[in-house]
Image (cartoon, grey):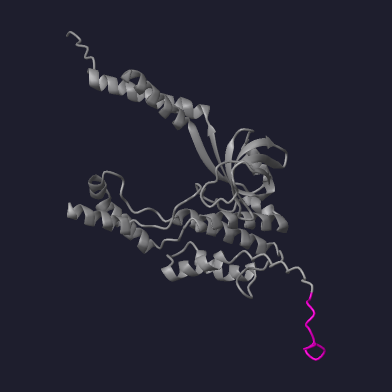
Amino acid sequence: MRKELRLVIVALAWVCAACTTHSYTTDSPADTRKLRIRAGDEIRVVTTDRDRISFKVAEVRDDRFLGVTVEPNAKESRLADTPVEVPYADVAMIEVTRFDPKAVAAAGSVVVFTVALGTLVLAGVPVVVVPP
Amino acid sequence: MRRCGVLAACVTCFGCTTYHPTISHPMSHAVRPEESALECGQLDDAILKADTVRWVIRDDGGTLESSGQRAVRYGANALFAVPLSLILHGPAYVHEPGSGVLDAADHRIVGLLQLKRDKGCPPAPTDEPGMTDLQMLEVLEPLTSGQGDLDREALDQRTTLLDHLRASPPIPPKPAQPRREQPDPETQEP
């Protein structure tokens, strides 16, 4: 039971580590397009009219995002579940949180390395005596 | 126990900053060579976006730090961070007040304004009375020069000016209300 709990904690830590958050400034709509935001991504934007919005992207169009607001973060005024439409031209700052497969691999390597190192330290490093 | 309490109070006061980012602040990049090809309208858009990024940092409490203040912060952290963290069982150090990201945003805005002036673009109004953005640039240039270190007063002046770069939107006129006829006291019956 205790071992299973430990495994669940390690798995949760792994998944959390794989969720990466990046923040960008966008100088043009082309910059926003380059970020490859997809439907389902949860993003936070600050628009040029100083509006802060957190929303889940429902649709990515050529010139704008369509989505629905999530629970508002600090200094955000829109209530959750409000439909929003954000043209790329209005986006000054964007923060993206997404599940990153590369981060999964990186976090996995760290976990495997740490567990292996811990096992070696606790169980003792095998010493091979080479006869002269 | 009492000593720990005093130390904790000192750290709380000393490490107290008003800088609390509500969104991770990206470092604004300097003006790129390719941006010199931007048209006047595109430059105004770029200034608007850079100003928005700067506004977020300021709204989250970001301030510029003089080299003296930075030295005090480094010194305090070098001396007290480790012992206090051990006493308080958690990281205890004086945080950076957002100076790096704010300074980068300031420099980007000034760089874009310089491009605007070099291209002969028309000036835009600001929130500073009787001052356009290009007139503001003349005052800002010595306050953002990389040479020498700026004192607290110069940093405060730069911050105040750039806080007023964007002109407030005009107040929409109130819808005309139907005028109420004032009763004429002479014709009014008692």
Reply yes or no: does residue A62 show up in magenta: no
Is B146 left or right of A123, judged from the image as shown? right
- x%, y% of residue B148? 43, 65
Q: Is residue B186 magenta?
A: yes
Query: Bounds of the magenta span?
Result: B179-190
> Closest to the observer: B23 or A78?
A78
Seen in the picture, residue B31 relative to A115 is either above or below; the reply is below
Tell whether B7 sits left or right of B34. left
Residue B24, percent from left and from top: 50, 46
**Front in this rendered view, residue A76 or B124:** A76
* Quadrant of image for the C terminus of chain B: bottom right
User: On the picture, is A60 further left or further right than B31?
Assistant: right
Check the image and report above or below for B185 versus A25.
below
Picture residue at 51% right of the left edge, 38% below the top: A21
> Which corner quadrant of the image does residue A69 belong to?
top right
Residue at 62% over, 64% down:
B166
Viewer-nearest residue: B65 or A100? A100
Q: Residue at x 67, y 41 (%)?
A: A65
Considering every residue shown, the one lying at the far bottom of the view is: B186
